[in-house]
Amino acid sequence: MKQSLLFVPTLRETPKEAEVISHRILLKGGYIKQTAAGIYSYLPLAYRVIKKIEAIIREEMDAMGACELLMPALQPKDLWLESGRWQDYGKELVRLKDRHDRDFCLGPTHEEVVTAIVRDYINSYKKLPLALYQIQTKFRDEFRPRFGLMRGREFIMKDLYTFHSTDADLDLWYDKTRQAYQNILNRLDLHYRIVNASSGNIGGASSEEFMILCDIGEDTIVYSDESDFASNTELCDLPVGALSPDGKGHILHAKGIEAGHIFKLGTKYSEPMKAFFLDQNQTQQPIIMGCYGMGVSRLLMAVLEQHYRDEVALWPDTIAPFKIHIIPLDKEGTKAYQLSEQLHDALSNRYEVLFDDRDERPGVKFKDADLIGANYRLVCGRKAQQGLFEVTNLREKTMVEMSFEQLLEFLF
Ligand code: ATP
Ligand code: MG
């Protein structure tokens, strides 16, 4: 794509409101724009990254056997009365009325809607298990929206719900989801710990959180220096140096950003909402459920908190907004420009290529290229007459010279 057509409203000054590095990068680089407190537009660069994160999540969800659907954001009060959460959810729930004075809310999560869908269809153990997920905008009127997309009032979440006839089957699917979450976070090149957590107002028996380790995290976790033991301090507050409860190693503390939360719900929703099935003995039982959330827009920021250099993004290869950035250091009509354009045409049906066709000074082009953070930067200028490009791998910071032909061979 031609850079002159890409909408990236970069800022010269670092905005005052951005307290953390990821937020500064996103605002300065023209990735996002605040529309109201805790409410953002994802501009083209951020949206490219978001779609790649979503694609990774979809691949892992589909691979474990979950089925994608899309439920409404606008939800009737009646369903929330059935679950008891119309009262319990409190002020975070965005409530509104339609023109006929009927009450609705904007979904902060979808246990009610999904349970109501499934109860009308699942009547026998033969139709279980079932796993349904969606990627969708959620609404929560957070008391203190902050750090940009980290704690928004409108944000993108992946939510998965599973339905079972036995506890053992729930355990199996819980473990499958746990593994899928690990795959996703590994593919995003994130350092994280899985911690025991409290279940909050979603309810249920046991739950774990996926914490991205990072100083700006709002949660504190305690973990063992030698084993997998890790817990949110909400649940288990041990001092640094204490013996780990599993007897292996000693306790350390760290700050974490919650990227995902997985719950064994049991029958918390199926019972009050009357989602029943007939078991093998023709006895009516409430469906056993699990629910599993993952913050897509929050992940975009969490990745940045762990991947940057000199206040610009160093995207993992899997999610960079572009793979290749071609930059001629001369304007249209020159050899450098012509070679660059040819390369763009040769590569663009294979890769996501950005071609800096603008008549700008090299300094401006490089500064913008830093903010965009494509995996490979191909610069044609000083040695255009010899047909050579300077090829930089942004993450590894290596630079080599290659001819047009060598580049094609390297990239194909
Ligand atoms: P938190 O403790 O951070 O408020 P939560 O326990 O309310 O999170 P869940 O209800 O489990 O979160 O939601 C699933 C996922 O959605 C979270 O793990 C997080 O990644 C993301 N998420 C939750 N609230 C927000 C928000 N306000 N802005 C962005 N992402 C969010
Ligand atoms: Mg919350």
Image (cartoon, rainbow, N blue to C red):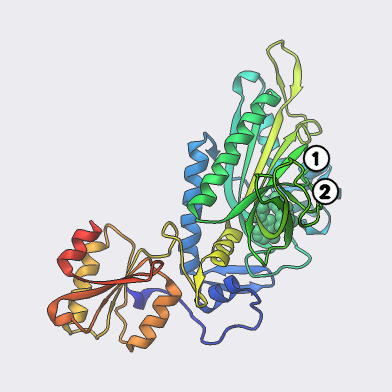
> What residue did someone put label 2 on?
86
x then y, percent, for residue 80: 79, 44
Report whether 375 appears left or right of 70: left
**Picture quarter containing residue 129?**
top right
Q: Quadrant of the N terminus?
A: bottom left
Report whether 373 appears left or right of 404: right
Q: Nearer the viewer, residue 272 or 261?
A: 261
Single out the residue that lies furthest toward the left: 386
Q: CA distance from mark 1 to mark 2?
A: 8 Å
**Residue 365, can we see it?**
yes
C-beta proximity under 8 Å, tags 1 and 2: yes
Q: How many marks?
A: 2
Single out the residue that lies furthest toward the top: 281
The amino acid sitting under disc 1 is Ser
Report whether 295 appears left or right of 309: right
**Picture quarter containing residue 150?**
bottom right
**Picture quarter containing residue 257?**
bottom right
Q: Secondary structure at mark 2?
A: helix
Q: Nearer the viewer, residue 398 or 384?
A: 398
The amino acid sitting under disc 2 is Trp
**Residue 108, can we see it?**
no
Q: Nearer the viewer, residue 108 or 201?
A: 201
Q: Quadrant of the C terminus?
A: bottom left
x then y, percent, for residue 390: 26, 75
Q: Please tell me which residue is depicted at 24% across the width and 85% down the height of the picture.
A: 330
x then y, percent, for residue 338: 18, 77
Using a 10 Å C-alpha cutoff, classify the residue at mark 1 as few (fewer than 14 neighbours), some (14 to 19) or many (20 or more): many
> What residue did someone put label 1 on?
83
Q: Nearer the viewer, residue 82 or 100?
A: 82
Using a 10 Å C-alpha cutoff, classify the residue at mark 2 as few (fewer than 14 neighbours), some (14 to 19) or many (20 or more): some
Q: Please tell me which residue is depicted at 33% across the width and 86% down the height of the picture.
A: 362
